[in-house]
Amino acid sequence: MTEHPEPEELRELCRQVLADRKPRTLFDSADEQRALWRELTNIGWAGVLLPEALGGLDWSWREAAILGEELGRTLVPVPFLSNALVAASGLRILENATATATLKHIAGGEWQVAVAGLPSARQPADSVVVGPAGDRLRGTCWFVLDATSADHLLVVADRDGATVLTRVKTGEGVELIPHQLADPSRSAATVIFHDTPATIVASGIDADRALAAMETALTVGLACDALGGARRVFDETVQYARTRIQFGRPIGSFQAIKHQLADLYVLLEGMTAIIDAAVAQIDDPTHEIDYQTGSLASLAYAYAADAYARIAGDSILIHGAIGFTWEHDAHLYLKRALLNQQLAGPVADHRDRHLAQKIASIGATP
């Protein structure tokens, strides 16, 4: 049985690995991003949720959450969310040769896999067309995270009213139109399929289960990313308030700044609590990834995404003029936070989902 590291030891190890990274130098270099992801894959990050038999670390979501937080803390532009969390979570519950082979390639670093067509992100493909030459994908996914660096795509599509999970190789028959994002730490593209040859990974109930797992992984992964970034921003803002002198006093001694920082601390503690609860529920072996489990993940995402945006925005205000400059990193965290609010669909939809589940559970109580 794989030994799980202590959380604080793992967190410290992550910070040592990422300590000398300069995210700004990586934003415009696809080759350097791929090299860094290969390095992280070599120490097991791509297989954090996968069993040892597939080349993974056989850890749990508790450890995956820490990795996600530390990557969010540093803004290092690697496809951890799309590969190690979203794609791996959907494929690992499928018991077929195609899913297993794909997971081995992900864990080994041979493939970077992006996920397209997730309903929560409002990016469905039009249809899967079955022709005499085999399964072919036709349609458009308007926003696919990490598509520009992916070797393969997992595409959630529809065939005759049933959910189908397919795998396609990027290249011939796949048109990518990169997006110019305000957040330079992420990449995305519109993906257009022109009768692209596709391999069916799962269909029907199995595809629905994989889809639920990927949706949950996306929301919890984004929440963890938000928590890591928010902690970094808050810590640096507190330090700045202690050392910035105005009118002969540290600005942190002013009552207005004290109250503002206290409000941000409450938000940060709330993020930590709800994310810990969501991660614990996913790791609970008695819970199937279903509507109820996804509901708590949705609540964690909605709370964390909004709290991150508030903390990052207020940090710029507390920093004053220096916070508005291009040279300071504060704007990078705000841009990351604002994009996070959109990557799993509107946060209001996730709050509604959680509320609907709670109302339904109350109504079902005798």
Image (spheres, helix red, strand yellow):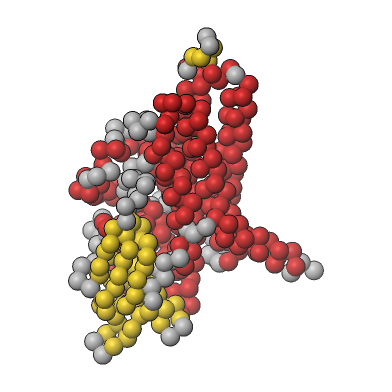
* Residue at figure coordinates x 54%, y 46% from the top left: 306
Q: Residue furthest right?
A: 366
Q: Is residue 27 visible from the viewing direction of this image? A: yes
Residue 16, placed above or below residue 248: below
Q: Which image quarter: residue 150?
A: bottom left
Looking at the picture, how far across and down is residue 201, in whole percent?
Answer: 35, 74
Q: Residue furthest bottom?
A: 132
Q: Residue furthest top?
A: 248
Q: Is residue 69 visible from the viewing direction of this image? A: no
Q: Which image quarter: residue 168?
A: bottom left
Looking at the picture, how far across and down is residue 314, in whole percent?
Answer: 52, 34
* Residue at figure coordinates x 45%, y 65% from the top left: 122
Instruction: Report the side of 80 relative to 340 (left or right).
Output: left
Q: Which image quarter: residue 354?
A: bottom right
Front position in the image: 313 or 203 = 313
Front position in the image: 96 or 147 = 147
Looking at the picture, how far across and down is residue 262, in whole percent?
Answer: 61, 30
* Residue at figure coordinates x 41%, y 37% from the top left: 331
Residue 310, placed above or below residue 84: above
Instruction: Report the side of 94 relative to 280 (left or right).
Output: left
